[in-house]
Amino acid sequence: MGRNQFFEIKENWEFRMIGNQEWFPAKVPGCVHKDLLTNKLIPEPFYRDNETKLYWIDKVPFEYKTTFNITKDFLKYENIELHFKGLDTYAKVYLNGKLILVTNNMFREWKVEIKKLLKEGDNLLLIYFDPPFLKGLLEMEKSEDKIPYYISPLYEFPKEPLVSPFTRKASYQYGWDWAPKLTTSGIWRKVFIHGWDKARINYLHILQKKLNKEKASLSALFEVETKTNQEAVLKLSYKIRKEEHKVPPVRVTLRKGINQIPINFEIIKPKLWWPNGFGAQPIYEFTGKIIIDNKEIDSIKVKTGLRVAKLIRNKDKKGESFYFEINGIPIFAKGANYIPCSIFPQEALEKNYREILSSAKEANMNMLRVWGGGIYEEDLFYDLCDKYGIMIWQDFMFACHLYPGDKNFFKNVEREIIDNIKRLKNHPCIVIWCGNNEIEIVKNRIQKEIKENYPELIPKIQKAYEDLFYKLLPKLCKKYDNSRPYWPSSPCGGFRKMENSNSGDVHYWGVWHKNHPLEKFQEKKGRFFSEWGFQAYPPLKTIEEFTNQEDLQIFSYVMKLHQKSPLGNEKIDSYLKIYYRPPKNFEHYIYVSELLQAEAGKLAIETHRKWKPYTMGTLYWQLNDCWPAISWSSLDYKNRWKAFHYYAKKAYTPILPIVSIYKGFLEVKVVSDLLKPFLGKLEMKIIDFKGKEKWKDLKEIKIEPNSCKSFFKEKETKLLKGINKKSSVFVVSLTCKDKVFTTNLFYFLPPKDLILPKPKITKKIRSTKKGYEIELFSENLVKNVYLSFEGEGFFSDNFFDLLPKEKKIVSFVGKEKDFIKKLKIISLFDIYKEEKDAKNNFYYHR
Ligand code: BMA
């Protein structure tokens, strides 16, 4: 036949609910919920309380079908294979009436040889999906060891047994404390047909054996499959920034079955891949070819970046370090936790990935943690992280519950892990494999709880956990990707070691889950904060898309339904009262909740950064949302930036002066992630809200590369003698050759105690190529200027403080004729209106 070929089966799909005669058009890849919606068979799942009307969907079976055409020529291939990149989850696949595959794992790829069943012309492919909830219940009942898998639910309803630990399917779809319970099913990834004859390349992995600035010693590992022993030639070439290089071809003898063939080669003066902020992200593109009888019969393209990534865990005085080192440079990880970008995982995927990941890059992030209760993301996600220099902490998909310890479950997991490691390991962005999210803690807690009543379960729980996270997963990581560290659980203090502040990673939830005040961020030390967070409402625009007028109250039924953290809205409210005066209308409440989250985040990030190098990472919970929700995210479901995202961008800036007051002392530290020394001036002043200088100090400073240093420390009472805390702000700027690098502000009191002057903003608006430029000026300090307008668009900065008598320019990207008319500007001053002016009394309504 000549060259191997493949094509995607994506046309003419139809679906129906079992029991219904009628077929409806379907989209593949996709899912049941989206197809029901497109055909107007269900209401919009995110609107108001529609979620609650859709709980039946995971309890009924569905089927999908299509026909695909096979030509006479294609039938000539000796081997023809059907390849599913992902089926969610319990599928029975029939080809021309014959059952060819039964699946039970959303995360696996499935390949079936189908040549014998194919015919020339139309072939019928039918896939039957068992309802995931009912199937999960069966699995739960079948499970031999009766381990209490079910821990206290993270969400308030519906009250159903939690079957997800028994089902290899994304846990968050069963409801999470930021996700609705919309457990879907369907053909969630692409379906292909492969035709091949003599041999095929299944896979090409670029292994970095040795790498430094001078030379990269690499090995391209070809996985070639063949049905007979035969001679072949393997060719390898690579491209970097349009330059093409060829590696001398290699003659090989293939043996029947799977052949692993390495081709060793070198790249002189390799271009190294760096995390965002530390250098460029050159991507090498490799092409592997197989030639038999002088004919090229198959080829494969893969991309990678060349870098040495290490997790450094060295013993020190306090315990053990925990940081990532890239190309020999210790990197302070700045970022967030990533959850799937939609409850329906194929939704607007490319657009979402691009918007979310570019927003992460824009906010100076260099690491995201792909959290274990979601999915192994698509290739494109990791491609973009490679491109943007965003390191990935990759959890395996296990989160917050105990999992079964039986053989069948393990066999299934084993295939899943191999598929995903092989698929993902060429990506330079991935720097660590992690066993699970929080199960080390859950296991220890459950064991403590049941110690008295069920002592016999304790060794069982321990064994199931050990077998999976201390034996199977590390064994597979070692075998299939020895180049990356394996970490058993996030968080933990080390192997079989509880979470602690002297080693390993930490999830700090005192603030929020334990209601600790925000200042507690300053007390909880850790080597690497892989989780912490604070919630806020999404921007009003997003709220308006899922509500109607009557829902616009913070404790309304609908607003509570879009808040999945138990009593979350109440929690925001009680924190808000500590730090802010009560806003008197809904719109202002949303705005203040965002400021509160942003301030909490600023404090946490700055605290963690100023502990460098003891602390070497901070990843907040959570970057994004999977539906329109009130949650910890800094980007809402529409990828609109909450105040926190703007704040995070500033707090993650490469070089930052940080002001803090702790135990009665005010301190100014400068943290630098720059790889060159910084020589410049540190300008510190205290001004009142009219701009009058109350105190000033100026220092010529030098900051060593990649370091953190204190430049000023003074007793608060001494420094502030005669200064009114209610109307002053500490302004610190780093300047170099008269250019201001960064400015940071510090207030001595929470916003509710500040006496803010009436803003007198003057604005000038100019149109630009991409939108508008807004120039703002005020005689007095204006706190938390918020620019908004009805249409779509993006403000380069927002929620910022306008310093007295200083000009601020914000650009707006978006095309809108009436922009000038529609632009709305508010600030913190505007929200504390008298009770009598309030339009409604929503604030007290419960
Ligand atoms: C963490 C996560 C999630 C959870 C979040 C907020 O511990 O791992 O399971 O959604 O906290 O509660």
Image (spheres, rainbow, N blue to C red):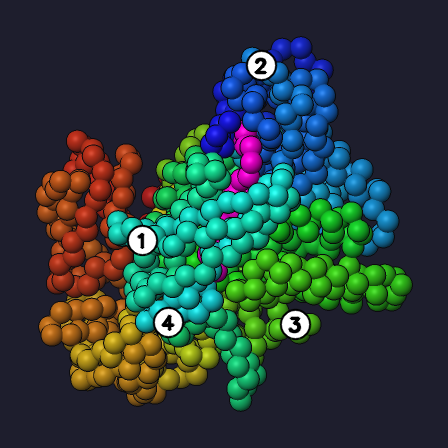
Q: What is the magenta range?
A: 191-207
Q: Residue 212 — which label?
A: 4
Q: Earlier in the sequence, mark 4 or mark 3?
A: 4
Count of marks, rendered view: 4
Q: Is residue 195 magenta?
A: yes
Is the C-beta of the residue carrying label 4 under 8 Å from the nearest atom of ligand 1? no
Q: Amino acid at mark 4?
A: Asn
* Of labels 1 and 3, the one closer to you: 1
Q: Residue 245 — which label?
A: 1
Label 2 neighbourhood size at 10 Å, few (<14), some (14-19), many (20+)?
Answer: few
Q: Amino acid at mark 2?
A: Glu
* Of labels 2 and 3, the one closer to you: 2
Label 4 neighbourhood size at 10 Å, few (<14), some (14-19), many (20+)?
Answer: some
**Cα separation between marks 2 and 4:** 55 Å
Q: Amino acid at mark 3?
A: Phe
**Cα separation between marks 4 and 3:** 30 Å
Q: Is residue 438 magenta?
A: no
Is the C-beta of the residue carrying label 1 under 8 Å from the nearest atom of ligand 1? no
Give the residue pinned by disc 2: 120
Considering depth in this image, is 577 or 640 the residue closer to the camera?
Answer: 640
**Cα separation between marks 4 and 1:** 19 Å
